[in-house]
Amino acid sequence: MSNQVTAMPGAQEAPHLRRVLGKWDLVLLFVVAVFNLNVLPSIAANGGVTIWLWMISLILFFWPQGIAVIELAHRYPGEGGVYLWAKEIFGDFHGFLSGWCYWTNNMMYVPTIMLYFVGVSVFVLGAGHQSLADNKAFALTASLLLLAILVVLNVIGLGVGKWVNNLGGIGTGIAAALLIGLGIIVWTRFGTTVTAADFKIPANPRFVLNSFGVICFGLVGLELASIMGDEIDNPQKTLPGAVTWGGVLSGALYIGATLTLLIAVSKDSISVLQGIVQAVSHMARRVGVAWIVAPFAFLLSLSIAGIGSAWLGGSARIPFVAGLDSYMPSWLGKIHPKYVTPYAALIVHAVVSMVLVIINFTFTGAGVQETFQKLLSLAVVLQLVPFLYMFGALLKIASGHSFTKGRYSKATLFAAGASGLLTTSIGIALAFFPAQQITSLLSYELWMFGGTLFFIGLAAFFFYVYGRRKAAQKVAAVAPAL
């Protein structure tokens, strides 16, 4: 496969990118990208019924996602992933919209990771500092500082930036193992107050509905490596095994960690920013190892930094490819002369994320936890739009008259496509139901509907404005030959 990004006639020549990601780099990338401990508290706060939602999502959304990633990466290799796949199968506008939603969702999601980092890292400072997480000035300053550090590391290159991802993956694994291990010790020594009734659907399931969309959102990430397809060493051989390992590990960790959180902390007491550390602190005191909280918080902080680095670096490849295709300003397709990275796209991504954090803190008046939940819910909607295209692509490929088998049979593609498309649609709809941290229903719905329409409208604006430029470039390229 060529080392170059495929560009349309008239677009600037695609630069060479370095293939620095091996199999275990990808496995750790998938673990750190998929298994996001930061979404667990907001899910577990809805009680034991979320375990059933995890199982449903793993079967009906996560398994089809793995099928889609492996099949589409096999048929359409290259840099861009969800952008490239939708473009090849549904046309240029749908490719751009898919990539745009994938990128802009991360403008919302990356700030939530920064806020989560703040909520956890204060435990490293020791007892008495936990209240800093609710201090807007401290949370804003720490979030922007971490974001700046991650941008610099990713501009230097994936050869360096991938080690942030890898350390994050290792930190995630150790933190999850410690959390689950403490939960098992507490359960065997003291039993649990969790009963079968906690796993029943509540009389008022309104808050639980939002969890399903967040769970689907928590399970995305297997497609992330394909966005960096031209930076993977031997992707046709490396990717399928890495997707399988990353998927199995992430699914098992999610269910185990959610159960542990429910055992350790009452669902009514779970903080969406500090729930994981709350659980470890509570269990550690019960078994006499309270000293472990600060090291655990440090490991979890590494994990969160890795998550931020993975999503920042991966999603920034979308505007990079769109810039090469001339659907966005061409300077977004520039690479750093020394580090050979899409530095312009990375910087733009970081700047927009910073602005969104500042706006939410300064102008909405929402608290840190409500800000986190609002950013997360809008990110869920935008993130799942590309998956409508991914699963729709499987159905279109399988129903084609000239179907040829790639990695999977026609029946498997039909089953995965139909299951994934239905689950994704439900997940998007349910994200518009407010979580229990939301204090104003009107403000929340305005944010959700307004934000969704704004970003989709902005995608249409960029596509058609720069689409005309692209058409003019094609004409200019053909004219000399005529």
Image (cartoon, rainbow, N blue to C red):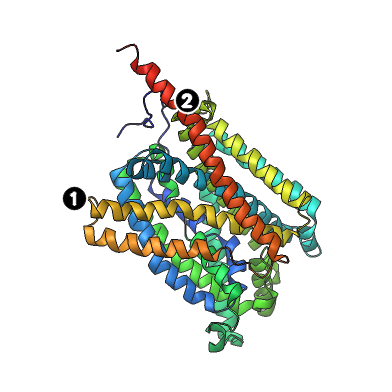
Please state the horizontal and vertical placement of residue 139, each as a whole percent of the image.
75, 52
Chain-order first, disc 2 or disc 1: 1
Give, as a three-letter code, the residue at label 1. His
In front of the other: 90 or 229: 90
In the drawing, does residue 250 fall left or right of residue 288?
Answer: left
Say which residue label 2 marks. Answer: 469
In front of the other: 180 or 42: 42
The answer to which image quadrant residue 125 occupies is bottom right
Say which residue label 1 marks. Answer: 401
Q: Secondary structure at mark 2?
A: helix
Q: Which residue: 34% across, 11% down?
A: 480
Q: Secondary structure at mark 1?
A: loop
Please state the horizontal and vertical placement of residue 449, each as a whole percent of the image.
60, 56
Please state the horizontal and vertical placement of residue 482, each as a whole percent of the image.
29, 12
Q: Quadrant of the N terminus?
A: top left
- 84 to 214, vertically: above or below: above
In the drawing, does residue 177 fall left or right of residue 440?
Answer: left
Give, as a three-letter code, the residue at label 2. Arg
In front of the other: 467 or 272: 467
Q: Which residue: 51% across, 31% down?
A: 465
Q: Residues within 10 Å of mark 1 (few under 14, many from 20)?
A: few
